[in-house]
Amino acid sequence: MDLTEFLVKTATIFVVFVLTLVIAMYSTWAERKVAGFIQDRMGPNRAGWGGLLQPLADAGKMFFKEDFIPALANKWLFIAGPSLAMLTALLASAVIPFGSTFRINGHEIVLQGVESNIGILYVFGVVALGVYGIMVGGWASNNKFSLLGAIRAASQNISYEVAMGLSLIAILMMSSSLSLGEIVAQQHGMNWNIFYQPLGFLIFITCSFAECNRVPFDLPECETELVGGYHTEYGSMKLGFYLFAEYINMFISSAIISVLYFGGYNYPGMDWVYSQLTSALGSETGHNIATLIGTAVFFGKALFFIFFYMWVRWTIPRFRYDQLMNLGWKKLIPLAIFNIIITGAAVLFLKPVITAWLN
Amino acid sequence: MQLTNRSKQVSNKEMTLMERAYIPAIATGLAITIKHFFAKKVTIEYPEVKRYLGPVFRGRHILKRDEDGRERCTACGLCAVACPAEAIQMVAAEREKGEENLYREEKYAAVYEVNMLRCIFCGLCEEACPKQAVYLRHDEFVPVFTERDQVIWGKDLLVEDMTNRYTREAWTKEEARALDAKRASGESTNVVPRAIP
């Protein structure tokens, strides 16, 4: 790997990192704004125009609060908990393809932190590690409520990961690739997976709600039963990291949903726009502008799903724990297996018939 | 025994497949919340936007002057007696020769103080006043105190400013009620707010 390639990769990763943080930061603002609007209120509007400086004010507040560690807590693990949560949340954004390529002086730069041929497995691995942050923090607090919250989080995440993985297998059967870039490229020209996998999409989005510990699956931190759940004993920026990690996870899973099911940076009429731009501005600038439009479309999709997360949060009440487990094990997993069988049958028998008929 | 006819029989019937699928119910809920998302917000952004509180709202006190700019108060002390919170204190003085353009009556309040921490804004002082001198303004509140010496309001703050007179649509509750009734029945009422009670 030569130096320029290294520098380019570093810059890409830095941009992805900053973008993730900024989006997560403004998700906290958007969450309150959406909550307010849905409840016929205005939401925060005092700090800056439309309350846009609210995240900065919150961060300042979080930093200047007392950083308290309970006397009987395991000190190192207590600090490791939120750090792990933050780390795993940020790791996952590395493999997401934010757009196609940039052309600078004949070099092709891929808008993706790491172009891995097992991207989707990497995301799954990192997301599965995310539960360690919660588990370690909840256990280290030496508090029964925290421990209960952490146990709930662990069992919930493990249960829903099964259904999530199974729903994903149907996608992998269709794309026969584990690379996220490849999966997006295959959805070019309105071949979005949502049209082929509506059931898989429903299962996947339900599971991602559970993975992010969002309403209606926010049992690990449900205030009414567990005080604050796994972060009962946390304050100051450690609590801030836990909450922030949740919003980063939300962004990551929104991005993954748009990559897997909604064609990532693909949009209708993309080829026409591309040919217009390249003929007008040359194959370099035109290509770059087309890529930027694609990236904007990708972020639009991801932000819509973040909005959807919030919309659902202020609509649906929380599940009971047995209902959660019933839904996960008795409904979603059989449905996901059924979906795999249907997809397999369609790929094996229906696809040759249709392609023969079309030709 | 049936007490009312509003009771509903509890039904534990089996849910249909549609209801158990849960998705239609979620969609209905999401439709309701998105309708509220785009609905007009009910918030009144207080310090910038102030709601009209009616012609007889009881805000801060004012000592009225008459049409010639003379203070109406004669320091009879009935307001202080009526005050359930004992917030009003005054010192009376006799009007000297040449002060006829300042004070309406032969006796006046040299000092008139309202303790705004004690005041409960009940409006008994304005009801007790035989000279229609003390009123609670409908358009201004007592602002937040930040210092102790802001608590007791003397005549410098209380007496009406003749360049910026305090006007009202209705000076008594009866008047206000009559106005309300007219407005409720849809009559066009264009009352000019006036300064003299």
Image (cartoon, rainbow, N blue to C red):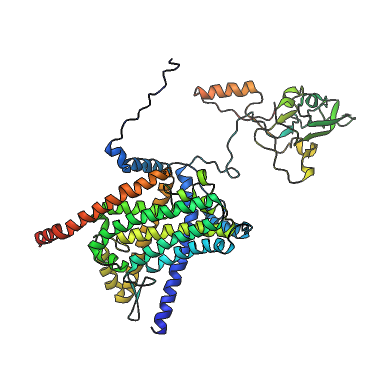
Farthest residue, direction bottom = A2
Left or right: where A331 falls relative to A349: right
Farthest residue, direction top = B1
In the rendering, at what x and y percent does residue A178 appear? 29, 67
In the rendering, at what x and y percent does residue A247 appear? 46, 57
Residue positioned 39% across, 51% down in the render: A308
Total marks in image = 0
Q: Observer-nearest residue: A274 or B177? A: A274
Left or right: where A91 falls relative to B137: left
Query: Which quarter of the figure is the C terminus of chain A placed in?
Result: bottom left
Q: Observer-nearest residue: B135 or A358? A: A358
Q: Is residue A270 visible?
A: yes
Query: Which quarter of the figure is the N terminus of chain A placed in?
Result: bottom left
Residue positioned 42% across, 59% down in the render: A251
Q: Quadrant of residue A282?
A: bottom left
Q: Quadrant of residue A249?
A: bottom left
In the rendering, at what x and y percent does residue A269 appear? 26, 62
In the rendering, at what x and y percent does residue A277 appear? 29, 70
User: Would you place residue A142 above or below residue B131 in this image?
Assistant: below
Left or right: where A352 falls relative to B192: left
